Image: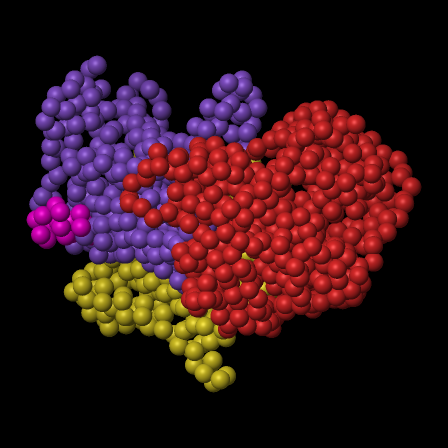
Amino acid sequence: MSDALINTLASVVANATPLVIAGLGETINERAGVINLSLDGSLALSAMFGFVAAQASGNLVVGLLAAAITGAIIALIVAVAGIELRQDQVAIGFVLTLLCADLAQFLGQSVAHTRPVVEMLNVPIPILSNIPVVGTILFNQDIMVYFSYILIFGTWYVLFHTRIGLAHRAVGERPEAAFARGTNVNRLRYVCTAIGGALVGIAGAAYSLGTKPGWTNPPVMQGDGWIALAIVIFGGWHPFRVVLGAYLFSGLRALSSAIQRTPSLNIPLVLLNGLPWVLMILTLVLVSSGVIERLLSVLPRPLQKWTRNFLRSDPPAALGTRFDPEAK
Amino acid sequence: MDIELRHIHKHFGPVHANNDISFTVKGGRIVGVLGENGAGKSTLMKILSGYQPADSGDILLDGVRAAYHRPEAAIAAGIGMLQQDPLDIPAFTVLENLVYGQPGGLFLSRKNAQKQLGDLCGRFGFALDADAPIVSLSIGQRQQLEIVRLLALGIKTLILDEPTTGISAEQKDILFDALRKLSKNEGMSVLLVSHKLEDVIALCDEVVVLRAGKLVGDAQMPVTKAELVRLMFGQELAPQTRAQVPLGQTVVSFDKVTLRGKRVTVENFALDIRAGEVIGLAGLDGSGQELIARACAGLIKPQHGTIRIAGKNMAGKPYRDFLRSGVAFGAAGRLEEGLIAGLTLTEHIALTSSDEALVNWPRARDLTETQLKLYNVRGRSTDTIERLSGGNQQRVLMALLPQKPVLLALEQPTRGLDVDSARWIWQQLLARRASGTAILFTSPDLDELVAYSDRILVLYAGKVYEIADAGATTIDELGHLIGGDFQKAAP
Amino acid sequence: MSKNRTWFQVVFAVAPIIVSLAITSALILTVNADPIAVFQSEWNGAFRSPTVFAGVINFWMPLALCSMGLIVTFTAGLWNIGVEGQIGMGAVFATWAALFVTLPQPAQIALEIALGFLGGALWGALVGFLKTQLGVHEIFGGVALNSLANVITIYLVTGPWSPPGGASKQSTAPFVTNALLPQISADFPVSLLMLILTFAAIIGVILILRGTRWGLQLKATGKNARSALLLGVPTTRSAISALMVCGGLAGIAGAFRVLFVYQSLRTLVSGGIGFLALLVVLLVAVRALWAPLIALIFALFLGGSTRLKIELGLDESLVGVLQGLIVLLVLLASGLRQRLSERDSGRGDLAGRPYEQPISAEQQEAVPHE
């Protein structure tokens, strides 16, 4: 494998990392039944606060913490409005998308285009990074990438192999049944939403302190929040598939910028910017039930079950709904 | 465990759902709680099992006053309830459902759980696959899982809410055997909530009867059916008489139709429906009967085959075309499919009563007033539909159906209604049938199927068995058929 | 009691605005500016001169058009986030006529406006097609189509439609006067035609939703598409037609932006008007009569803010922050008010209907369409 290709793949992994973290964060709160639509704004605002805090303190951890807190607070606004105040989660999330983006722009004026004082460096992992090809692609990265690896397996393990995971999924699927088993439905929803939001915040910092250091106007991650939301659907609310979606998107971006650098291909550059959005629609079409059924009817039988299981994407049954224990 | 209820009261707004109810259940006894829909028995059981607090009154467990207001606290006190729609999590597997809610550490032990499931299932002859997802189970199996789950939590009193609706005769036998074992061998007290007299007679040691929120009687078994009826309704019920209607021509015909659902496929299905005919579709939940009812109205498109209405092939056409050809559909969930919460009665009528581009509101209001009187609906034309009671909503739904359809395809037309409302609905349906409308309906209630159908189609896993003369069949035979026992019933 | 009630209402109406202003003031202080000066500049800004006020009206008209369009889609239960892209495509379609067609002025303008409507309507129909036929939720379809409309615009202004010799400029060549909407007067530069169209749209949407079968069908589809379908409503057609009407109105707004405001096609032609219209409609809780009024207040805010940068060196995003805060806090306050008044009157919405099963979660599947 050529060095250029290996480097490209390593950068695909690095560039996918914010999407991985944000996608998993959103998966966590949607699995609990709370939809936080504000990602496109909260990524920007937490990236900005993360950057400001890191600049002021000269400390990356302080920056990450500030970003996580920002993300968690935004997500909790959605949760309080949806659970306690009975407002439409989508409406609140949408308003927050715009509000946070404007806030980030307004408060970020003073730091826009300043030089970062701290940088996230690549930390090769001993032994593992020496593995040919794979070592360079996966294990010579910055700490955010390693954090995302832990997060991927951690989320999966907690969701599907622990008692907390059972309760977590149950409050998103059938809160009445969770209530009957003694789970405090709304409290668990708040906790999951806060964790999901904090991860979205960290994802924001993964841009401003990691892949795209600094703060610009308009922010570099504009639009990625929507991509992350779509990836959660494409991923069928399963951590591994969500991550697969994030890497696919990142790979496609690398491909399209490679095409842009190839002058012999006569494709207008600007049109390539539309590619992620076309891909987003295509992936959502692919996992919609009607299309799966149509696809299945033309596939040979042995492939049917496998295809259905692979593409199936049922949202948590109680996503976006309220649960009032007294109304039973 | 002995349970004593003392002066339980519960209000919902103006309704006095439980009015000064007191009785005692001794350990090792099976007590039937009888009453028609709306008598207050489900409310009482929810109070006993911690789902709802009582407004006033006491519960004594083995003579000690109990105070719990949550289901898991009731379970800790030894009382568990099997809901009519089992409270499991559809996205989980059997094992996950069993384990969820049990005390224990963060990590799950698959081995222990599997052993527990195996032991409990073995004791009662339940067949549950540990890794099967809940959505692949029948209601009977989901009940078995809930019972196993509650037993694993160490309950000493089991409450069952209408457990025999929607399960086969075999599953009912297994269930009743398990309940007898639990009470006789292990001293468990069992409360069976039901409006089905046969079940109570077959299983219970004693009964208490509720009517309009009050305890109106109790008796030690055996008691005759007639006596129970008198206790329940305060009078003998006049038997339903079935008017013979001459059947007309074939109005809807299925030929070589394949319908694919999420869980079941009906293949090579053929059926001719004649004018004035009532066809009942029997079967366990998800056996394919709802596919047929929906296909009649074009809500499910067949994979193969033809569906002819008045000779014209309609397969693949949308619902609106079926509606224009005279097929109307009524779904089981009134407020989910059929009525529109947030719209007023007048708006409902305006929506269905004309095709003009501009709505004539004064005329729609007049028409609504007329219809409300005609269908005896308690409600005002300016009320939004969700403010009406279930029975009144069903009446509105009747008023919205086309006047003389060729075929009415109905899912569980009397679900959740009290006896009076259910009878009223059938009067309306039979009146339309008298003018030539064919009716095809599904029901989990075998009595209803036998009482009103001319023909019954029994479905099991997508396969169809036809009972050509519904008058000649029995509840018991039908109960075996819906369990898939087609050979035994075949003459 | 009733006096208490009135108090209650007043507090909950005023509090969100006061709190928003307070938070915004705090934000202004963090960037070392004087909030009083900012609000003064805002207040004076909008009414400074007839020309500036005309600017406010010129901003209000497309905002009101989009808001009325969104009233239609919200009535049908649709989150038409794609309204931004629908503005953009209206602008693109109108630009084609402005650049490449030459007709007598009335016919020219009629064609441009009609094409603007068509462009927006087609982009709206695409959202509807994706939703009803391919199962892509309108929020995601809309977001993607917004970006695609933007990409198409950039492609056109930098490529095929770029002005001769000036491909680096992010706009087409200025349109010829014949293709532009005339203004009322040089002192009060407002398009009379657009004013008429806007009022027609406001009145038209209100009347159509109240008095026509289509309006009733939209309402039924929006409240419960499954039931509506069973009652004979063509739900797919309702959804797509609602999106087309909204898209069409947004398309006219887009046409106006290029034919009057910018006098050429440029990138980001919508100026965020579509998203702002969504905020307006959320703020008025989809009440058609209030939307144009709130749109006017928002337009005044923005009209006043144009000089913030020049006079005080503040970013215009401040106005967006204030608007977002007001909408957020109004929504939260209305939730709080409902909660509190429920607590007053005892039990909530289930009171009086004890035997109704709450709608079980598993029955809420995706909205079906024919």
Residue A136 lies, in percent from the top left, at: 16, 23
Query: Considering only vertical position in the picture, is C152 above or below C271?
Result: above
Q: Can the viewer see residue C367?
A: no
* Left or right side of C265 for A58: left
Q: In which quarter of the image is the C terminus of chain C?
A: top right
Label the magenta part by its dominant secondary structure: helix
Report the coloring of the rendering.
by chain
Question: Image point 15% across, 52% down: which residue?
Answer: A52
Instruction: Output the letter for the chain in purple.
Output: A
Query: Considering only vertical position in the picture, is A88 above or below B128?
Result: below
Residue B228 lies, in percent from the top left, at: 72, 59
Residue B47 lies, in percent from the top left, at: 51, 63
Residue B322 lies, in percent from the top left, at: 74, 39
* Left or right side of B42 for B459: right
- Number of numbered discs on residues: 0
**Which image quadrant for residue C26?**
bottom left
* Left or right side of A144 for B351: right
Q: Can the viewer see residue A234?
A: yes
Question: Image point 44% across, 56% down: which residue?
Answer: B78
Q: Colour of chain C?
A: yellow
**Which image quadrant for residue B455?**
top right
Question: Image point 37% across, 47% down: which residue?
Answer: B102
Considering depth in this image, is B188 or A170 the residue closer to the camera? B188
What span is in magenta? A49-65
A63 in magenta: yes
Query: Considering only vertical position in the picture, is A145 above or below A134?
Result: below
Query: Considering only vertical position in the picture, is A237 above or below C187?
Result: above
C99 in magenta: no
Q: Which residue lies furthest to the top in this view?
A: A1
Instruction: Output the letter for the chain in red.
Output: B
Considering depth in this image, is B156 or A94 the residue closer to the camera? B156
Considering depth in this image, is A16 or B13 the residue closer to the camera? B13
